[in-house]
Amino acid sequence: MLEFAVLGILHDSPMHGYQLRKRLRELLGWMRAISFGSLYPTLRRLQRAGLISEDLSADTAWDGTRGRQRRARKVYRLTAAGKQRFAELAADSGPAACDDESFGVHLVFFARTPASARMRILEGRRRRVEERREGLRCALARPGEGIDHYTRALQQQGLEASEHEVRWLNELIAHERAEQGFESK
Amino acid sequence: MLEFAVLGILHDSPMHGYQLRKRLRELLGWMRAISFGSLYPTLRRLQRAGLISEDLSADTAWDGTRGRQRRARKVYRLTAAGKQRFAELAADSGPAACDDESFGVHLVFFARTPASARMRILEGRRRRVEERREGLRCALARPGEGIDHYTRALQQQGLEASEHEVRWLNELIAHERAEQGFESK
DNA sequence: TTCGTCATGTAATGGGTTACATGATTAC
DNA sequence: GTAATCATGTAACCCATTACATGACGAA
């Protein structure tokens, strides 16, 4: 998850750790802010795996106006292997990709995801949410013993949220199809 | 989290592990199904901590009709210390209690949570969701570079979900207040 | 001079997962 | 007889967190 997000962000442009984290919260910060304690080890791991390269920033090491030295920053950039790995992860439309969090990350990088994979992911996510929706409909239909009104309220809210998300996904899917149709003309 | 959920369920009635897991998914399964690999170690831990007691089921060890022996099941029940611990956890309205998952678990056990704590938790959750909502409104207001239409769609969906949840929380809070007013008459 | 933010990292811990191992009971 | 479900557990692992440690730079 973090690996995928990091590769996705570096796909756009090289960046150093601190900057990366800011971009991370800008893009998916409202889902979760990630901590340095997991970011830096991840960067090191990716570097060791040859997916990103690390070099001390040359361009910003010196402040041109005053010739003062800034703290050296490590700038990470995607390698060819990293691009390939990103492509693999982005195209993965398995069950794991349909989790709340994971789906969000995938969607953020849709611009760099092939159209066919986008479709599979959207449909996989829709199926997932539909299942949750059906489960909740079922639970609400038969009252079941030991389910108090608070729990029912929570289930009701979950049901409405699911219904809303399915509608949203339907729109996205329709939009995708329209674009694909347009492109293949 | 698991600890809290287990204590909450055993608060109602003693149960063995397998049964506990079913109840767990019945109550909050649509958020996440927990695995035995984490349930059993948790039960052991709680037992060692003196929060639950474990005894081999006497009532079901023998099938009365045929005198056949079932596999011995360990039935867990809440101890006095366990009840106290549950009360502590249930009354905790700190930031951790306002997370998506944690809030759901708290709500499910609201029937065994004092009214004042219920109020604090609901308001804490509302504030949390309002913050997310404001963050998203802000993000959507200023387009920001490098935010494509997929990301924006996700943010828009997040915003609508937040707005919906705030309305839902407002209803719950109003309902709580009405009940409290009624009771104190 | 002190506070906030930039910047990078380590260590200990937590809270879960999957996969594996075992075996009885029930329904077809 | 064979598959599903009941029932309990262990071991290896994963991915993240918090707390800690360090230090430079800019602004008040």
Image (cartoon, coloured by chain):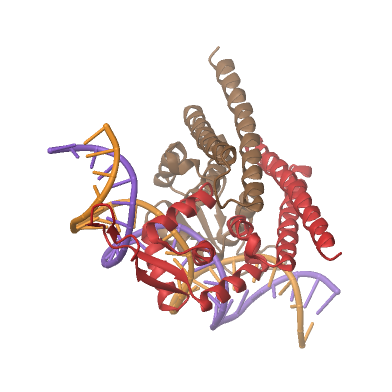
Chain colours: A brown, B red, C orange, D purple
Q: Indicate whether B41 appears above or below A90.
A: below
Drawn side of residue A32 relative to residue B60, left or right = right
Q: Residue furthest top?
A: A185
Q: Quadrant of residue A181?
A: top right
> Along the line of sight, which residue is nearer the eye, A48 or B25?
B25
Q: Quadrant of residue D13?
A: bottom left
Q: Indicate whether A183 appears above or below B179.
A: above
Picture coordinates of residue A65 (x, y %)?
Answer: 73, 64
Q: Indicate whether B185 appears above or below B145.
A: below
- At x 70%, y 39%, the residue is B156
Q: Indicate whether B157 appears above or below B32.
A: above
Picture coordinates of residue B24 (x, y %)?
Answer: 48, 54
Q: Residue furthest front?
A: B65
- At x 61%, y 72%, the residue is B87
Drawn side of residue A87 relative to residue C25, left or right = right
> Along the line of sight, which residue is nearer the eye, C26 or A35?
C26
> Along the line of sight, which residue is nearer the eye, A177 or A152?
A152
Q: Is residue A144 visible?
A: yes
